[in-house]
Amino acid sequence: MTGYGVIISAEAREELAEKWRYLAEAADIDVADRYLDLIDAQCEKLSTMPHRGTPRDDLRPGTRSISIKRNATVFYTVEERQVLILHIAFRGQDLARLFD
């Protein structure tokens, strides 16, 4: 059985870029790179186990989420043989605003 394709939306890419910029300034570039590599690795794991996340139909029908080190949450949908990463939220973000 082949895995699912993982696609990161433009919104999620921008959210990651903002977090990288923040971490690079607040800590350093190596910290920012390692943190985003961790998030990327967890997103890629969804290619083999896409339904492992928690259902979050309260935000949008069909949405699931996984938590990464209690600091980030990846929100995604599974359609046919694809996982679409919708958003990547960081602790304290207003989720309702993300899903408006």
Image (cartoon, rainbow, N blue to C red):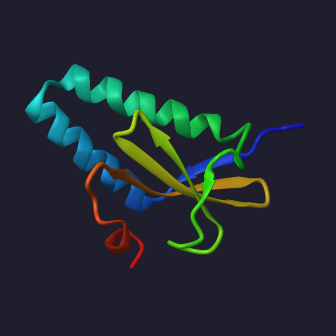
Q: Nearer the viewer, residue 3 or 74?
A: 74
**In x, y percent, where is residue 96?**
36, 73
In the image, residue 87 sits, relative to residue 26, either above or below, namely below
- Quadrant containing the C terminus is bottom left
Question: Furthest residue to the left?
Answer: 25
**In x, y percent, where is residue 64?**
60, 58
Along the horizontal axis of the image, is 8 left or right of 61? left
Image-quadrant location for residue 68: top left
Question: Furthest residue to the bottom?
Answer: 100
- Quadrant containing the N terminus is top right
**In x, y percent, where is residue 61?**
62, 74
Image-quadrant location for residue 84: bottom right
Residue at 30% across / 27% down in the picture? 33
Question: Furthest residue to the top?
Answer: 30
Along the horizontal axis of the image, is 10 left or right of 6? left
Q: Nearer the viewer, residue 10 or 98?
A: 98
Residue at 23% across / 20% down in the picture? 30
**In x, y percent, where is residue 82?**
70, 54
Disc tally is 0
Residue at 42% across / 73% down in the picture? 99
Q: Nearer the viewer, residue 99 or 55?
A: 55
In the image, residue 30 sits, relative to residue 73, either above or below, namely above
Along the horizontal axis of the image, is 19 left or right of 52? left
Residue at 25% across / 29% down in the picture? 32
